[in-house]
Image (tube, grey):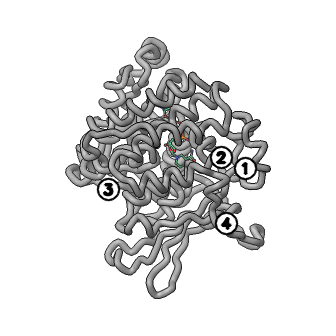
Amino acid sequence: MTLKRRVTVLGATGSVGTCTLKLVADTRRTAAAEIEVEALTAHTNAEALAALAIEHQASFAAVADPGAGGRLAAALKGTGIAHGAGPEAVIEAAERDADWVMAAIVGAAGIKPLLAAAHRGADIAFANKECLVCAGEAVLAAVAEGGGRLLPVDSEHNAIFQVFDFARPETVRRIVLTASGGPFRERPRDTFDQVTAAEAVSHPNWSMGAKISVDSATMMNKGLERIEAAYLFPVPKERIEILVHPQSVIHSMVDYIDGSMLAQLGTPDMTIPIASALAWPERIPTGATPLDLAAVGRMTFEPPDEQRFPALRQARESLEAGGLMTAVLNAANEVAVAAFLKGQVRFTDIAALTDHCLQTVQPEGDPFTLEGVLEADRAARAAVKARALSL
Ligand code: NAD
Ligand code: MG
C-alpha cells in the first residue's frame, strides 16, 4: 500500500504537533508514502513555526497571536510559504485543502479551527480533548455533516478505538480507561498545597505540554477523558470506568458481555497512537520502542481515589449533569491551571476554583450551538478569575 495524505497540523509547535511532524518526516523516508504538508499553526512562537514550515515544505503557516505576524513574515521571507496571523488565519489554515487534520491545539481555543476542518469533511486526528468536553454536540454534528472521520489520538481513546466493535456496540459491557495516577499518586495529601509548578509538570511516564501535565497531576485529565470517551464511543456514560495503572502499558480496555476484555498495549510514546490515526485503517512502521513485557515485569492496578483527586468527581458529576456543565468545568479548569502555572494560586486552589465555578455558574444557553458553548465558557472564565483574585 502507498499511504497518501495531505496533512495540516493545528498546534504544530506543541508536544503532539512536533511528534506528528517527526512521524510524517520519518514515514516519508522509510515507508511507501506520499505525504504532503498543507498548513501548520501555532500560538505565538513564530520562529519555531517558520522553521517547521520550511523543514516540512508547508504551503501555509499561521500564528494565532496577531502580534506575532510580523515575526512570522520576517522568518518566512523569500521562502514562498504563504502566511497569516490572528485567530482567523488559524481558521483559514483549517479550511485549506488537507484530507487529514491533526487537532493538537490545547484548550477551547481549538474549537473554531476544529469545526472548520470537520465541516469541510477532513479526517480529524483528534488530540484536542477540551473541544469535545466543551462543544461535544457541535463537534459531532460538524463531523457528521462534513462526512469525515474522527480518529482518536489521545492514547486511551486510540486504544479503545482499536479494540471497540463499532458494528456491535450492544455487546460492550463497559469501557475501562486506564490512568497512570500522575506524579502525586503516593505523595502525602497534606503536602498538596506546597506542590510547585515544576513538580506538577514532571509526569512519571509521558512527556507532554504544560497544561495537560498539570491536568494529569490533578487527575482532571482523566476526568476530561471520561467525558471525551462519552462522545467518542456509543456506550452509556455510566459504563465508562477509570482504573489506575501506574506503569502506563495498557492504554485502555473494552469489556464485552461474554467476559472477554480486549486491550491495546504499547510503550508510552504518542508516536504510536498518532501513527495509528495517520495510517488508519492501515498500519505503518514507527521508531517507537517495541514493548518488552519481560522488562516491564509487573503490572499493577488500583481503583481511582475521588477524595484525593476531586477533579475526578467534578468531571463525573459534570458529565452526569450534562448540558453545558462540561463546558463550564473545562473553562474553569483552563483558567485555574493557567493561574497555577503563573504562580498566582496554589495547586489545591485549582480544584477549589473549579468547584466554586460548578456551584455558581448555571449557563442557560443551548449546548448544541457554538454560541451556547462560548457563552458558558465566558461565564466560567469570568467566575474563576473573580474568585482567584480573592484568594
Ligand atoms: P502543547 O502546549 O505542547 O502545544 C499546544 C499547541 O497549541 C502549540 O502549538 C501552541 O502554539 C498551540 N496553541 C496554544 N494556545 C493556542 C491558542 N490560543 N490558539 C492557537 N493555538 C494555540 O500541548 P500538547 O501537550 O501538544 O497538547 C495538545 C492537545 O493534545 C491538548 O488538548 C492535550 O490535552 C492533547 N493531548 C496531548 C497529549 C500529549 O502527550 N502531549 C496526549 C493526549 C492528548
Ligand atoms: Mg490520554
The reply to whether callout 3 and callout 4 are in contact (CB within 8 Å) is: no
Residue denoted by label 2: 217
Circle 2 — which element?
Answer: helix
Where's residue 29, x and y in %?
52, 49
Give the mark nearer the N terminus: 3 vs 1.
3
Where's residue 25, x and y in %?
51, 44
Amino acid on which the number 4 mark rests in the picture: Leu
Residue denoted by label 3: 149
Quadrant where the C terminus sits is: top right
Q: Is residue 319 left or right of residue 346?
A: left
Circle 1 — which element?
Answer: loop
State the separation of the CA atoms marked 2 and 1: 6 Å
Amino acid on which the number 3 mark rests in the picture: Arg
Q: Crowding near pointer 4: few (<14 within 10 Å), some, many (20+)?
A: few
The reply to whether callout 2 and callout 1 are in contact (CB within 8 Å) is: yes
Where's residue 59, x and y in %?
36, 31
Q: Crowding near pointer 2: few (<14 within 10 Å), some, many (20+)?
A: many
Instruction: Single out the mark in the foreground, 2 or 3.
Output: 2
Instruction: Single out the mark in the foreground, 4 or 2.
Output: 2
Which labelled disc corresponds to residue 184?
A: 1
Residue denoted by label 4: 291
State the separation of the CA atoms marked 4 and 1: 25 Å
Residue at 46%, 73% (x, y): give it: 174
For the view shown, which residue lies furthest in the left direction? 145
Quadrant assignment, res 306: bottom right
Residue at 52%, 33% (x, y): give it: 13
State the separation of the CA atoms marked 2 and 3: 31 Å
Q: Is residue 16 left or right of residue 299?
A: left
